[in-house]
Image: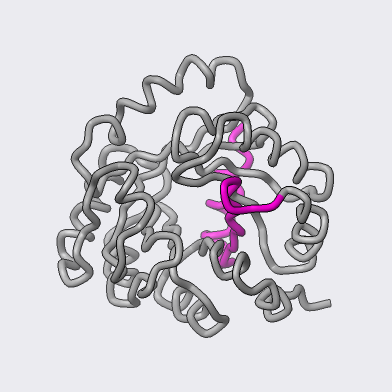
Amino acid sequence: MNLIYKNIQDSVSNKKKLLAVLIDPDKFSIENTANFVKKVNESIANYIFVGGSIVDEKATEILVAEIKKYTKLPLVLFPGDVSQITKKADALLFLSLISGRDSDYLIGKHIDAVSKLRKTKLEVISTGYMLIENGKETSVQRVTGTKPIPRKNVQNIVDTAKAGELLGMKLMYLEAGSGAIHPINTEIIKSVKQELQIPIIVGGGIRNKQQLKNTYDSGADMVVIGTVFEDNEAFFDELKKEI
C-alpha cells in the first residue's frame, strides 16, 4: 500500500502542513545520529529524507540503518544516484529533473534503478524535481550539468511544473538547492500552487521560522530543511512539538 503518499494527500486535504528533515550522508557524522535524531523526534518533523548529490557507495544504507534505531518516523530516500537506493528505507522519491534537459536525469537513471527496485518493497513516489535559481551554483548543478530555471521566469516555472503534473507526477518538488542564498520566493510558490492539483514540496535556503511560515503561507504542502540543521542545530528548539 502507498501509505506515505496517502498520508501526504490526507494532510493536504486536511490543510496540515508537513516538514521533512533532510540528512545528507556525505555531510553527516554518523556518530552524531542518536543525538541528532532525538532532536528530530522532539520537533514537528513528519519525515526524515536521506540523500545527497554525491554520496559514497553504501553510505546511505549504513546511515538509514542507524537512523532506524532511534526513530519511528518514515525514512524517505532522496537519491542523487542509483547507488543511494536501499531496501532499509520506507519510500523513495523517484525524482525526474524536469527543469533540465539531460535525458539521464529525466529517465535514464530511473531505468538503471529498476533492477534494484525490484528487490525492495520501497514505496516509489513519482516526483517532478525542479531546480530554481538561488544566487549560487549548487551541487545538483555541478553533478547533473543542468542549469536552474531563472527566478524571474515565473511563467516558465509554472508551465514546467504543470507539464510534470500532466505527465503523471504525484509530487512536485521546487528546489533552491543546499545552502541556497535565496529560498524559493513566495510569488513562485503561489503561482505553482494555483496551477497544480498535486502536493508541492519546497526546499533550499530556509534558515528560520519566519521563512518557514512564509513558505507554508505561500502554498507549500511540505517543506524540506537540511543545511540549517547542519550549521545550527539550535533551530530545532524553535520547531519543538507543542505539548
Name the image quarter holding residue 84.
top right
96 or 176, nearer to the observer? 176
Q: Which residues are magenta?
A: 1-29
- Residue 11 counted in the magenta span: yes
| Picture quarter with the N terminus | top right
**Residue at left offset 80%, top offset 50%:** 71
In this view, 43 is above or below 211:
above
Q: Where residue 56 sits in the image (x, y, percent)?
A: 55, 35
Q: Find the residue positioned furthest to the bottom.
A: 210
Taking the image as shown, residue 60 lies to the left or right of residue 94, namely: right
The residue positioned 66% from the left and 44% from the top of the image is: 75
Nearest the eye: 147 or 172: 147
Q: Is residue 18 magenta?
A: yes
Quadrant for residue 17, please give it: bottom right
* Residue 227 picture quarter: bottom right
In the image, what residue occupies the spot 44% across and 40% down? 80
Q: Picture coordinates of residue 191 (x, y %)?
A: 27, 69
Residue 87 sits above or below residue 166 on the image: above
Horizontal relation, residue 238 to residue 51: left or right: right
